[in-house]
Image: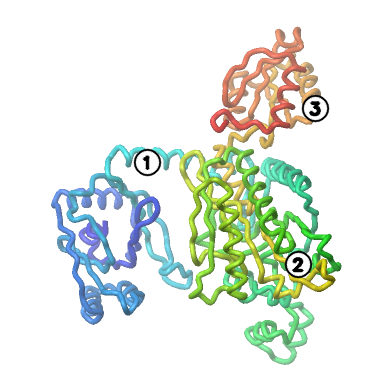
């Protein structure tokens, strides 16, 4: 692809072109913007290069020669990438035809070995992912060993576009993101709020079974609290800036302090600062520590649907799945070391219950471990070893494959992440369980043991949904907007065939509402076919057609979103069926 781009746009400057999980991309600096027509031209040139059967030749060189080459060819970004290569690694070029690129390899031997490819789209990308740098143009593409596999993948992409939660969110009136409020801050509309509330009700019921206690904490806390926890500074790059009370600002302004001096005083603790909370755990810790505990009180399980705030770069924001403010189904367990295994098991069972209820049964498990060579982790290595081993033992009980990934732990402890594959094969990291010996140490937590001495509890962080925003975004795409009955914002819609049937339609509606069903009556003066089409587009699980025949028999004609025309049913029988489906949380037929 890069060869083709330089043939058509020889003035283009190249940055980086790595493979990805689903294909590849290359970043270009070009004065003009690439267009859809340009992609077609580039693809055509790529096909010519394949036919030329160019050989990929590996060339090992010195750093000095590589720098000289890029200076002569006016490729400044490549010089920067040259500096990224570790001193003990060789510098290698690959040549194909007239094109020479800095690359570690490997490659296929000849271009004719490339059988099927497609350029997909163009996006903006800041150099090195830093919005302070120049924005480059990124061309995404993919390649497969055969045209059949490529076509299958492209069909999957088309299906993904239909399921895009941003598109469905607008069409189904689920959520809104408004520039006047702020990017990455989700406004839940009434239909979306129903889905969120039903999920919260569901998980709250499961938590009561496991002995959790509900708590509430504020959205902001003292900066010092997050210094003790380590979120400031370990997590500083992902936080909103601390804020200073206006009284301090007024006082220091009179003294002639600059903003940077005030910020430095706040970081040093000379003046009081506050922080939008990036995590709920420090506040749950303070709740635990507000009362004395003996070993008989443990485990203490505190749960909260707590809203937290993280700073994400604008280029990384994506609908509901990557936001700046989100609510976690968060909980923290304080237990003895002997209770740790059983408590981890309970957390894992909870995550499995969530996934099974929602038809997310295809998932893998990832254990995020500490990287011993990194300085981003806090705490005693011995405690890290104990926490990591506890998670390994727990993961083996799940009966699914798991991988270990050094460097993926939280700064305070290792974690188990659940990576779910949806119905069209995409992966999403959702539920998480984390073991933490470090925050109890940093906050000097203790309980009185059976020996009447002070002992340090172990802490578990867990969130089966993770972010409610992200989870709902994933669910929208997982179900393609056709939610199971218990989650659907509107579960049943009554469709009278004429105004003469409105009274009967209202009686059916009243019966549904009395049974706790979310239902409505379509009173619009439209033909029945138009009402049915609208109901299908709005993904209403059940449409009830009522005419004179239905009225005379106290019946309804039932149409299902998934199964089509189900025929005539007595009203009471249908109401009982719907109530049962809601209680049992029946999945759509496509996922059952």
How busy is the neighbourhood of tag 2: few (under 14 within 10 Å), some, or many (20 plus)? Answer: many
Q: What residue would you read off at disc 1?
A: 154
Q: What residue would you read off at disc 3?
A: 515
Q: Quadrant of the C terminus?
A: top right
Viewer-closest of 477 and 127: 477
Q: Tell me if I can see residue 243 in this picture.
A: no
Residue at 57 percent across and 72 percent down: it is 237
Hey, which quadrant is residue 317 in on the image?
A: bottom right
Q: Between disc 3 and disc 2, whose residue precedes?
A: 2
Hey, which quadrant is residue 386 in on the image?
A: bottom right
Under circle 1, the secondary element is helix
Rendered view: 160 above or below 497: below
Residue at 82 percent across and 73 percent down: it is 453
Residue at 70 percent across and 12 percent down: it is 547
Tag of residue 189: none
Q: What residue would you read off at disc 2?
A: 285
Q: Between disc 1 and disc 2, whose residue precedes?
A: 1
Q: x%, y% of residue 22? A: 39, 50
Under circle 2, the secondary element is helix
Q: CA distance from mark 1 to mark 3?
A: 45 Å
Q: CA distance from mark 1 to mark 2?
A: 49 Å
């Amino acid at each position: 692809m890069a060869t083709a781009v330089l043939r058509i746009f020889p003035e283009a400057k190249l940055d980086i072109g790595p493979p990805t999980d689903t294909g590849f991309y290359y970043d270009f600096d070009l004065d003009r913007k690439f267009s859809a027509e340009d992609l077609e031209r580039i693809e055509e040139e790529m096909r010519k290069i394949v036919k030329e059967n160019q050989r990929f030749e590996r060339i090992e060189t010195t750093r000095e020669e590589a720098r000289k080459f890029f200076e002569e060819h006016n490729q400044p970004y490549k010089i920067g990438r040259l500096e990224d290569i570790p001193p003990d690694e060789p510098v290698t070029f690959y040549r194909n035809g007239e094109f020479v690129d800095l690359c570690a390899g490997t490659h296929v031997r000849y271009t004719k070995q490339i059988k099927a490819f497609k350029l997909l789209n163009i996006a903006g990308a800041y150099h090195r992912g830093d919005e302070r740098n120049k924005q480059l143009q990124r061309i995404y593409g993919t390649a497969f060993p055969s045209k059949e596999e490529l076509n299958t993948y492209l069909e999957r992409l088309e299906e993904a576009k239909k399921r895009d939660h941003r598109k469905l969110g607008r069409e189904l009136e689920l959520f809104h993101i408004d520039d006047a409020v702020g990017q990455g801050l989700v406004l839940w509309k009434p239909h979306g709020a129903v889905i969120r509330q039903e999920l919260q009700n569901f998980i709250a019921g499961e938590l009561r079974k496991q002995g959790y206690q509900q708590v509430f904490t504020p959205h902001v806390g003292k900066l010092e609290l997050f210094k003790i926890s380590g979120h400031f500074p370990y997590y500083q790059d992902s936080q909103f800036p601390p804020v200073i009370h206006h009284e301090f600002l007024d006082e220091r302004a009179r003294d002639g302090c600059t903003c940077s001096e005030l910020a430095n005083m706040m970081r040093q603790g000379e003046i009081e600062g506050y922080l939008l909370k990036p995590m709920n755990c420090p506040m749950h810790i303070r709740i635990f520590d507000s009362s004395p505990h003996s070993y008989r009180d443990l485990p203490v399980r505190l749960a909260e649907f707590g809203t937290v705030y993280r700073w994400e770069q604008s280029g990384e924001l994506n609908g509901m799945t990557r936001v700046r403010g989100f609510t976690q189904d968060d909980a923290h367990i304080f237990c003895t070391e002997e209770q740790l295994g059983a408590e981890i098991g309970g957390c894992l069972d909870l995550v499995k219950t969530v996934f099974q209820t929602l038809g997310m049964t295809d998932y893998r498990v990832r254990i995020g471990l500490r990287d011993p060579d990194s300085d981003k982790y806090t705490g005693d290595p011995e405690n890290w070893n104990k926490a990591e081993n506890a998670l390994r033992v727990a993961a083996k009980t799940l009966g699914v494959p798991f991988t270990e990934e050094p460097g993926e732990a939280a700064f305070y402890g290792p974690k188990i992440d659940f990576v779910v594959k949806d119905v069209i094969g995409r992966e999403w990291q959702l539920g998480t369980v984390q073991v933490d010996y470090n925050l109890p140490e940093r906050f000097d937590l203790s309980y009185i043991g059976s020996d009447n001495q002070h002992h340090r509890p172990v802490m578990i962080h867990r969130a089966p949904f993770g972010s409610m925003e992200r989870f709902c975004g994933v669910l929208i795409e997982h179900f393609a907007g056709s939610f199971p009955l218990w989650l659907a914002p509107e579960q049943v819609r009554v469709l009278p065939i004429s105004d003469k049937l409105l009274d009967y339609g209202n009686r059916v509606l009243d019966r549904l509402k009395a049974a706790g069903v979310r239902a409505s009556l379509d009173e619009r003066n439209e033909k029945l076919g138009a009402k049915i089409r609208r109901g299908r587009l709005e993904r209403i699980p059940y449409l009830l057609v009522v005419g004179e025949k239905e009225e005379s028999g106290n019946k309804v004609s039932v149409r299902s979103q998934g199964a089509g025309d189900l025929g005539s049913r007595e009203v009471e029988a249908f109401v009982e069926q719907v109530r049962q489906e809601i209680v049992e949380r029946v999945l759509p037929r496509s996922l059952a």
